[in-house]
């Protein structure tokens, strides 16, 4: 069976989900890398699509964020909605997001 070229791949959905979780928790790639026991460069490659998140990585992401694996695979909005309150940043994007009005 061939994948529909107009539909994003599962890998692309997971990259979006991880990006959304990083944003929602205020974490940086370096923070996630330290928690997963990999380098920031490895996280960067996985997030850019030059390397893939493995099934073992998915298990680690699940533990790190406190979200069951099936919920991680249902998309960014769903995963962020399942994020435990204690893991959410006080301000979306953490300290990295500053909007100045002047």
Image: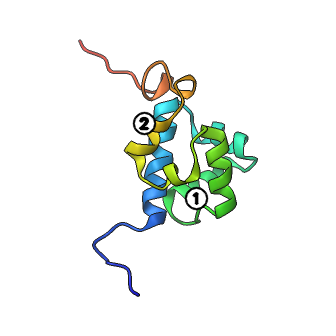
Name the foreground residue: 98 vs 58: 58
Residue at the image position 57 percent from the left and 58 percent from the top? 46
Q: Residue 5's quadrant in the figure?
A: bottom left
Q: Which residue is mark 1?
A: 45
Above/below status of 48 relative to 33: below
Q: Furthest residue to the bottom?
A: 1
Callout 2: 10 Å neighbours few (<14), some, many (20+)?
few
Circle 2: element type: helix
Circle 1: element type: helix
Q: Residue 47 placed where, x, y %? A: 52, 55
- Distance of mark 1 from mark 2, alpha carbons? 26 Å
Callout 1: 10 Å neighbours few (<14), some, many (20+)?
some
Q: Is residue 76 left or right of residue 58?
A: left
Q: Is residue 36 left or right of residue 25?
A: right
Marks 1 and 2 close (CB-CB < 8 Å): no
Above/below status of 6 relative to 29: below
Q: Which residue is mark 2?
A: 81
Above/below status of 61 relative to 84: below
Q: Is residue 39 left or right of residue 11?
A: right
């Amino acid at each position: 069976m061939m994948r529909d070229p107009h539909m994003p791949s599962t890998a692309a959905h997971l990259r979006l989900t991880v990006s959304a979780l990083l944003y929602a928790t205020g974490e940086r790639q370096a923070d996630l890398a330290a928690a997963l026991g990999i380098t920031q460069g490895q996280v960067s490659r996985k997030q850019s699509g030059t390397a893939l998140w493995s099934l073992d990585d998915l298990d680690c992401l699940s533990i790190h964020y406190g979200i069951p694996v099936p919920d991680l695979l249902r998309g960014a909005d769903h995963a962020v909605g399942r994020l435990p309150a204690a893991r959410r940043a006080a301000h979306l994007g953490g300290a990295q997001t500053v909007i100045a009005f002047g």
